[in-house]
Image (cartoon, rainbow, N blue to C red):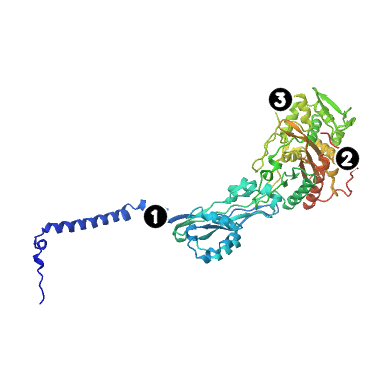
Amino acid sequence: MRRSLAYTSSPLLASKTPAWRSKFVMGCIVLAFTGLAARAAWVQVIDDDFFQRQGEVRFARTLELSANRGRILDRNGLILASSVPAASIWSIPEDVEKNTPEDLAKLPKLAKLMDMPLDQLKKKLAEDKSFVWVKRQLDWDVGLQIKALGIKGIYQTREYKRQYPEGEAAAHIVGFTNVEDKGQEGMELAFEKDLAGKPGSRRVIKDRLGRVVDGVGEEVPPIDGRDIQLSIDSKIQFFAYQKLKEQVLAHKAVGGTVVVMDAKTGELLALANYPSFNPSNRKHLTGEQLRNRAITDVFEPGSTMKPITVGIALESGKFKPSTIVDTTPGRINVTGSTISDTHNYGVLTVEGVIQKSSNVGTTKISQQLTAQEMWETFSAVGFGQKPQIAFPGAASGRLRPYKTWRPVEQATMSYGYGLSASLLQMSRSYTVFSNGGKVIPATMLKLDRPPVGVPVFSEKTAEQVRKMLALATGPGGTGQRAQTVGYSVGGKSGTARKQVGKSYAQGKYRAWFTGMAPIEDPRVIVAVMVDEPSNGTYYGGTVAAPVFSTVVQQSLRLLGVAPDMAVQPQIVANPVEESL
């Protein structure tokens, strides 16, 4: 027998419920949905700027489209610096952890491809869970090998890195860029704006893994950097560097530098320093290697200043090349200070003073000149003035105002002590003798037309001094080892004590030689400095002059200059040593 249930017997169901209650509940639900709809309309249609920005912050990115950096070329169009594609490896470490054991076993191979210890790789991946740069600017083919490993969480992006075909030979000229491809030294820094160009941009949407999902807006194409053509001849540069390096090592010197300048235009054909560095591999780079000695370092030039002093004397009309200067007894007292020669040369002509490099003779000549006319000429040829050259860090040297000169200081400045100059300034000053008495500016950029010179001496004075420079490299002169096969040369050696603090260091010298060739119509000026030679000899005529000789000969051959002599160098057994 089926039992019947009386649902209405429940007192709750039997009670009457007011109709307004259900209508109230329904109204609340409708109102809530209306509010949500209104809010959605406000957020998505009316006032959506804030949320659009937030969405873009999380997923939209502006990709920089790198401009291809301009090349640096030598005067003949050969490449000194150029950019090549490179792979930069980055990672999302939390994704790397999700790899299978088989893929994680590939990490040692990954580390080997990046030339990185495995422990260092693991340390890198532990730096951040969301993003980390693992290795920048790897060779492109290495990047392809890493991609082929297929390790989840290891990604790469295309960048550019610089290559320097001339390596350490041209490192101080070209300089280098950092990992962001920004110039840090040399011409890379000096012409950063021109070389870098202007990057473009592209707006994209990326997913969580950094993959591009979609493009947004118009793409702004990059503007590539422009090429820079230098005055440097890469063949002369390489040869000069090699010869300088050999001499520095042979004489156990601290370092050295050589400058090769076009005697007609002031264009630098070579500028080499040793020690140097490899701009493509700077792991062990030191400040000593980085120094561009030819431009940033200044020294007392010693006897290489004597031709300029004699030029002032000839221009004044008080002296002629044949004027007699008595240097007996090989020393002279100037206001209590003794100035000496290495030998008692006795009676000399002005020509003989340059040939024998007499300090006493130069001092006696300077005593017939005023401090003002010496200062004005020294300044006119560039001493104490910052070189107007497109290169960072060029030093101005030191040349005190003439009103402060004491008699003994005027005497020592006449033969290269008491003032300082860089090797670049020294080589530029000699253009006054190679250009008919006009000094011309130095430049590291290839010129389209010859520069305008500034008159300092007459053509007659310039020619007379050139003949004296030729005598200084001939028999009886201090620079005989500067002679070269097939070409006439002229120049002046110098040996200066090295100043450390306010005094001169015992047994430390700098050996100089500055000259030009061919002597009748100079085409190149070559200046050489060897710092602290310590292998038994330190005179400029024996240490620096041989570098001058070989560099001049090779430079003139490469420039296609016909030989003007058919004689062999004539070097006596015991050449004259210049006075210190």
Q: Secondary structure at mark 2?
A: loop
Q: Nearer the viewer, residue 507 or 359?
A: 507
Q: Which mark is residue 494?
A: none
Mark 1 packing: few (<14 Cα in 10 Å), some, or many (20+)? few
Q: Mark 1 or 2 closer to N-term? A: 1
Q: Which mark is residue 575?
A: 2
* Amino acid at pointer 2: Pro
Q: Mark 3 or 1 closer to N-term? A: 1
- Where is mark 3, residue-wise? 404
User: Where does the N terminus fall, quadrant-wise?
Assistant: bottom left
Residue 64 in view here: no
Which residue sits furthest top? 335
Q: Give the vertical position of 535 relative to 67 (above or below).
A: above
Residue 399 in view here: yes
User: Where does the C terminus fall, quadrant-wise?
Assistant: top right
Q: Nearer the viewer, residue 574 or 393?
A: 574
> Label 3, label 1: how many angstroms apart (C-alpha)?
71 Å
Q: Mark 3 or 2 closer to N-term? A: 3
- Where is mark 1, residue-wise? 55
Circles 3 and 2 in contact, beta carbons < 8 Å: no
Residue 44 drawn at (x, y percent): 32, 56
Q: Secondary structure at mark 3?
A: helix
Task: Please identify, in this view, whether the residue under mark 3 or under mark 2 is nearer the observer.
Answer: 2
* Amino acid at pointer 1: Gly
